[in-house]
Amino acid sequence: MARTEKRKIGDFGERIAEMFLVKRGYRVIEKNYLKKWGEIDLIAEKGDKLHFVEVKSANYINEQKDNFRPEDKIHPAKIARLLRTIEIFLLEKGRESDDWQIDALVVFFDTDKKRAKVNLIENINL
């Protein structure tokens, strides 16, 4: 099955996000954890804390032109779906007592210049 352009951008952003986290001492334990009501892009550990990471990607040029903020797509309904999916993950893995948080990782990329700008927004589940 052919991947849509949007899915290709998302996959590219998730690869960059994973490299970003690993370079900063996180250990990625799961990618694209999928349930019928939601998906968690990356699940990582750092120290004693689990990080459920929502990755948002955008073309850098569009961001500059349209003043577009991918993190604005992480709205209350999205957070509610994430929380439900996280609850199932914790139960399935026997990790209900673990300390955890939801983070957003925004990836802006410029394919022409082959560069990316990454912004980590921590603990968005407040």
Image: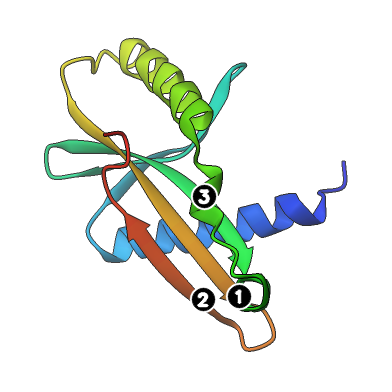
**Along the line of sight, which residue is nearer the eye, 44 or 120?**
120
Residue sitting at x 87%, y 41%: 1
**Along the line of sight, which residue is nearer the eye, 9 or 83?**
83
Seen in the picture, residue 81 relative to 124 is either above or below; the reply is above
Amino acid tagged 3: Asp
Element carrying mark 2: strand
Which label lies toward us, 3 or 1? 3
Identify residue for label 2: 116
Specify the label residue 72 is tagged with. 3
Q: Distance between the residues labelled 3 and 2?
A: 19 Å
Identify residue for label 1: 60
Instruction: Determine contact: label 2, label 1, CB under 8 Å.
Output: yes
Q: How far apart are marks 3 and 1 (CA)?
A: 16 Å
Residue sitting at x 72%, y 56%: 8
- Dot 2 or dot 1: first in sequence order is 1
Q: Is 9 left or right of 85, judged from the image as shown?
A: right
Residue 45 in the image: x percent, y percent?
25, 42
